[in-house]
Image (spheres, rainbow, N blue to C red):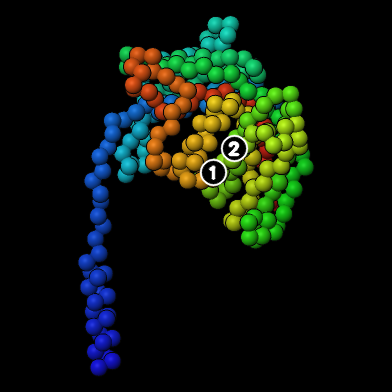
Amino acid sequence: MKTIRIYILIAMGLLLIACEKVIDVDLETAEPRLVIDASIDWIKNTSGNRQKIKLSTTTGYYNSDFPSVSGANIVITNSADMAFNFVEDPGTGEYICNNFLPVVGESYTLTISLNGETYRATETLTGAPEIEDNIIQNNNGGISGDEIEITYYYQDNINEKNYYVFSNKNPHIAFPQYKVKDDENNNGGLNPIYYSDKDLAAGDVINIKLIAVSKRYYDYFRKILNASGSESGPFSTTPTSVNGNIINLTHSSNAPLGYFRLSEVDTRDYTIQ
């Protein structure tokens, strides 16, 4: 009798495997929305004259590619009405400027004309402190004490309210991992940033970026990280859209996704020992 029961269980298991079927849920797809990636990063000790803005549209849930958008007219002007034109690399949706002039504290206005509609945003370029040289490695770091962890530092400016985004990229991940921080609890202090990953090993190079941002962008990016369920990155599917600072002057109800940001950035590479 025991043998018969075993045969019955095996037969039932094979039947369940044979009946396994992939089901695609038919989801409603909203009308595509314009996505504007207008992050102007001025890397310290560079001229910052080459900058890029990328236009794309939202797409269906099952699609992994975001369609690029061509044919836009894009210009950024500063407070002296100096114009910096961004010209598309044909067919890519990437618009390049080779003569941008970054100045900390300067106000800039982005204007995009596309398909009879005009989009605009104004933002100020925010200055960043340097990442200190004394990066510390701990081979017993992380929450469980079994990860390689590094600690790097920056000196906050006591004379102003500051907001930061930290980007950490290692060879084992496709996208950077992000953290956001303000100076509410340590204004003017030497601040530590901790980073660890379970896959880090000797010889791996971690690219670190300290990005100075405005309070409005800080609030915007925090919402993106929260919506994605983690501070490890904003690339997961978010349950709701987060509005940036770019408005549609022609049809206010047809607002784009994305943000116009100008930041000074300090960056370092650290090799795991």
Q: CA distance from mark 2 to mark 1?
A: 8 Å
Element assignment for label 1: loop
Q: Nearer the viewer, residue 204 or 76?
A: 76
Where residue 104 appears, x then y in whole percent?
A: 65, 19
Element assignment for label 2: strand
Where residue 79 appears, x then y in whole percent?
A: 58, 9
Q: Quadrant of residue 123?
A: top right
Q: How many neighbours does mark 2 have within 10 angstroms: few (below 14), some (14-19), or many (20 or more)?
A: some
Going by the picture, which residue comes out furthest to the top? Answer: 80
Badge 2 or badge 1: first in the primary sequence: 2
Identity of the residue drawn at 48% across and 17% down: 121
Identity of the residue drawn at 34% across and 28% down: 33
The amino acid marked with disc number 2 is Val
Indicate left or right for 204 with 248 as reference.
right
Specify the label residue 180 is tagged with.
2
The amino acid marked with disc number 1 is Glu
Q: Is residue 211 visible?
A: yes
Which quarter of the figure is the N terminus placed in?
bottom left
Q: Is 272 located above or below residue 127 in the figure?
A: below
Q: How many neighbours does mark 1 have within 10 angstroms: few (below 14), some (14-19), or many (20 or more)?
A: some
Identity of the residue drawn at 75% across and 27% down: 158
- For label 1, the residue is 231
Q: Is 158 located above or below residue 49 in the figure?
A: below
Q: Say if mark 2 contacts mark 1, CB within 8 Å.
A: yes
